[in-house]
Image (tube, helix red, strand yellow):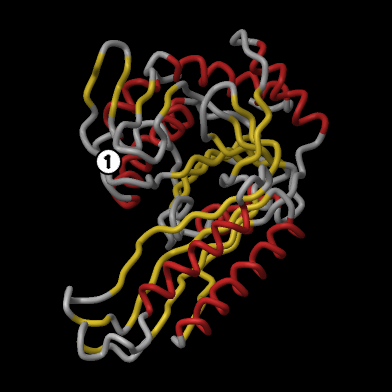
Amino acid sequence: MEDPRRYLLELAPLAGEEARGEYVASRLPGARRDRLGNVWAGEGKVLLLAHLDTVLPPKPPRRVGERLYAPGVGDNTSGVAVLLSLPELPGVVRGFTVGEEGLGNLKGARALVEALSPEVVVAVDGYLPGVVDRALGSVRLRVRLQGPGGHAWGDRRLPHPVFALAEGLCRVRALVEGREDASVNASGLEGGQAVNALPQEAACLLEVRALEEAALAALLQGVEAAFAEAARAHRVGLALEVLGRRPAGRTATPRLLQAAERALAEVGERPQWLPGSTDASAAIERGIPALGFGVYRGGGAHTPGEWVLPSSLLEGQRALLALLRGLGVG
């Protein structure tokens, strides 16, 4: 069995799924790859998945005390390092996926789950002692509002798509104020080319999340209505494009949950049951028992200040092996 800390240090500066996939494939006995860039090895009905991609571009890590800092050093460089450090185990497939973050829409995990037909799926992703036993549903969209454009003074009474976008976003934010079961996020805002010209288009990326499919569908309807109202009020055109969907729900069996609880007990922890969006969602939408299993300690995920405790990867390795034993494999 390998030391995951070595893999962590070598993987952390590597940018891009291709480079990371090549690294993993060169160190994974019997590695296979598909056209998407997924890497996997092993045979069996338990599929372990760790995603290769990161939200922010990786950078060489810097050490401060016991912590290691770098974008993506935890999510999911640490998950990849722990999974790669496991030995070949009977009944277990180790898979390293593309397209989990951002607009990847789980394309890697969905492809492997379809191709390998596992009986159990575990996403190796997240903090100890977190266990994602419930998939958080989401829809990701591109919002575009269009106007005629024009001179900032001479055409000042013409429709303005940026102000329409701003009003639409405020309306959407109001839909989730005070709610614990749903969220919205806006990013990648664009609009206009010059400070003295009316924009012809304003656009953004939007994500809505909810714990239940019915709540997600209702929230999506509310988002569509909010932007439609803003577009009408500002007399601009509107286009909404769905870029990706992830399911809500849960499929983890009592046996799988019990195995996770006992595995964490071996490292002196009790599970923190959480909803989340991981590669396990690709199995949940097919009705396959699945969960996400955290294997490191850290913080600051999806920020430039992300950090991990490298020593915690050894705990994650022990817990993951214990989970497999609890499932009767490995």
Q: Quadrant of the C terminus?
A: top right
Which residue is found at the position 21% from the left and 90% from the top? 154
Residue type at the position of mark 1: Pro
202 or 131, which lies in front? 202
Q: Secondary structure at mark 1?
A: loop
The image shows residue 98 at horizontal and vertical percentages of: 44, 52
Badge 1 crowding class, 10 Å Cα cut-off, few under 14, some 14 to 19, many 20 or more, is many
- How many numbered marks appear? 1
The image shows residue 319 at horizontal and vertical percentages of: 59, 19
Q: Looking at the rendering, which quadrant does residue 159 occupy?
A: bottom left
Q: Is residue 223 left or right of residue 60?
A: right
Q: Is residue 96 left or right of residue 11?
A: right
The image shows residue 233 at horizontal and vertical percentages of: 51, 82
Q: Looking at the rendering, which quadrant does residue 259 occupy?
A: top right
Q: Give the residue pinned by disc 1.
A: 58
Which residue is found at the position 50% from the left and 25% from the top? 87
Q: Is residue 185 above or below residue 94?
A: below
Q: Is residue 236 left or right of residue 130?
A: left
Q: Is residue 167 above or below residue 113?
A: below
274 or 227, which lies in front? 227
Which residue is found at the position 51% from the left and 43% from the top? 95
